[in-house]
Image: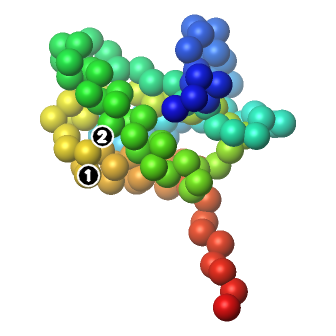
């Protein structure tokens, strides 16, 4: 994921938390902040020490990043997203993480419907 597609600074996280809306399931919480004039989406990750040791936390972050890279075309741009991992995410496989994130993204209505090609 490119640096310009990441949320890193504390004030950027705070803005998404305070001005955006959130959607959650048992494994993840997604905060969404619409940003007019931004051609791409940005992602910030928050994985607490409650999740596990550094190896576990980094693995969860890597799985989340992989999901967003694989589904980059389907996810709405012009928005900032902050994803918070909850404890059950630590024991999940990539397929489970993918299913859970897809579910919460659909709940947040950030997955763009596929445009069917005309024959």
Check disc 1 and report the residue beneath it.
Answer: 95
Residue 77 lies in quadrant: top right
Q: Is residue 14 left or right of residue 90?
A: right
Residue 12 lies in quadrant: top right
Gap between marks 1 and 2, in whole Å? Answer: 16 Å
Residue 98: image x %, image y %?
34, 49
Q: Secondary structure at mark 1?
A: helix
Q: Quadrant of the C terminus?
A: bottom right
Check disc 2 and report the residue beneath it.
Answer: 26
Q: Who's the residue at 42% across and 52% down the image?
A: 102
Residue 45: image x %, image y %?
45, 24
Q: Who's the residue at 32% across and 16% down the image?
A: 48
Q: Secondary structure at mark 2?
A: loop
Would residue 82 be seen by someone viewing this image from the given angle? yes
Residue ranking furthest to the left: 91
Q: Is residue 100 left or right of residue 76?
A: left
Q: Who's the residue at 20% across and 18% down the image?
A: 55
Residue 63 lies in quadrant: top left
Q: Who's the residue at 60% across and 69% down the image?
A: 114
Q: Nearer the viewer, mark 1 or mark 2?
A: 1
Mark number displayed over residue 28: none
Q: Is residue 39 left or right of residue 102?
A: right
Cβ–Cβ below 8 Å for labels 1 and 2? no
Residue ranking furthest to the front: 2
Residue ranking furthest to the bottom: 119
Would residue 14 be seen by someone viewing this image from the given angle? no
**N-term mark: 1 or 2:** 2
Q: Relative to 32, say whether 6 is above or below.
A: above
Q: Nearer the viewer, residue 53 or 86?
A: 53
């Amino acid at each position: 994921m490119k640096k310009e597609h990441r949320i890193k600074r504390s004030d950027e996280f705070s803005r998404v938390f305070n001005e955006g809306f959130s959607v959650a399931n048992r494994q993840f919480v997604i905060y969404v902040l619409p940003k007019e004039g931004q051609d791409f989406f940005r992602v910030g990750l928050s994985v607490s020490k409650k999740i596990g040791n550094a190896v576990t936390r980094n693995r969860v972050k890597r799985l989340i990043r992989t999901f967003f890279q694989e589904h980059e075309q389907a996810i709405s741009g012009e928005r900032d997203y902050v994803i918070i991992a909850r404890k059950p995410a630590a024991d999940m496989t990539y397929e489970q993480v993918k299913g859970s994130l897809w579910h919460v993204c659909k709940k947040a209505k950030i997955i763009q419907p596929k445009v069917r090609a005309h024959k």
